[in-house]
Image: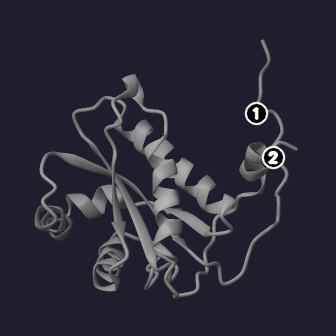
Amino acid sequence: MNEIINNIVTRRSCKSFRSDMLPYETIDKIVEAGLYAASGMGKQSPIILVVTNKGIRDKLSQLNAKYDLRNRPDPFYNAPVVLSVLAPESIPTAIYDGSLVIGNMMLAAHSLDIGSCWIHRAKEVFQDEEGKKLLDDLGITGEYEGIGNCVIGFPERTNSTIIPRRDNRVYKI
């Protein structure tokens, strides 16, 4: 099987991470893959916050937990790195463009044997006053919408179970 297709078929969300930090070169490779995601009209509008600072990472986790209906103490599953993707609200394809960035980063992580998981509620986090202040403190100005968080790290355990795909989802015309 083609290596790219194999990565797509075998990638699984990781929900149990070791706390040790990834090498920065590995993080950079994953982020670079996100920057090469397709975007509407080639605008390349999404931005990525690469959070490796434990204090800020924990603050983002705390803010995310505030909107988590499951009341998990750490919705980031102990992952040491959070890649928050935001896109300008003025771009009509913002959600799609940011989603492709996260998808690329998850596939890149898998190709490097790094665990990843999409964590939702970035929209709520960056609409929250504390989230807005964080962006302001970082010098990020403008009206951005949080698209999602891609948490990455060394997996505590791996999930290699490939669940069969549901039938009746493809219609050939």
Q: Is residue 151 visible?
A: no
Q: Residue 56: where, in percent of width, then height?
A: 28, 78
On-image quarter of the C terminus: top right
Residue type for callout 2 = Arg
* Residue occupying image coordinates x 51% and y 76%: 23
87, above or below 21, in the image: above
Q: Residue at x 18, y 68 (%)?
A: 134
Is residue 159 rendered to the left or right of residue 74? right
Q: Which residue extends farthest top?
A: 173
Could you classify mark 1 by the number of other residues whose Cα lies within 10 Å: few (under 14), some (14-19), or many (20 or more)? few
> What's the amino acid at mark 1?
Arg
Compared across the picture, whether 168 is left or right of 95 comes to right
Do tag 2 and tag 1 residues touch (Cβ < 8 Å)?
A: yes
Where residue 84 sits, quadrant-wise, is bottom left
Could you say which disc has been placed on residue 169 in the image?
Answer: 1
Instruction: Say which element carries label 2.
Output: loop
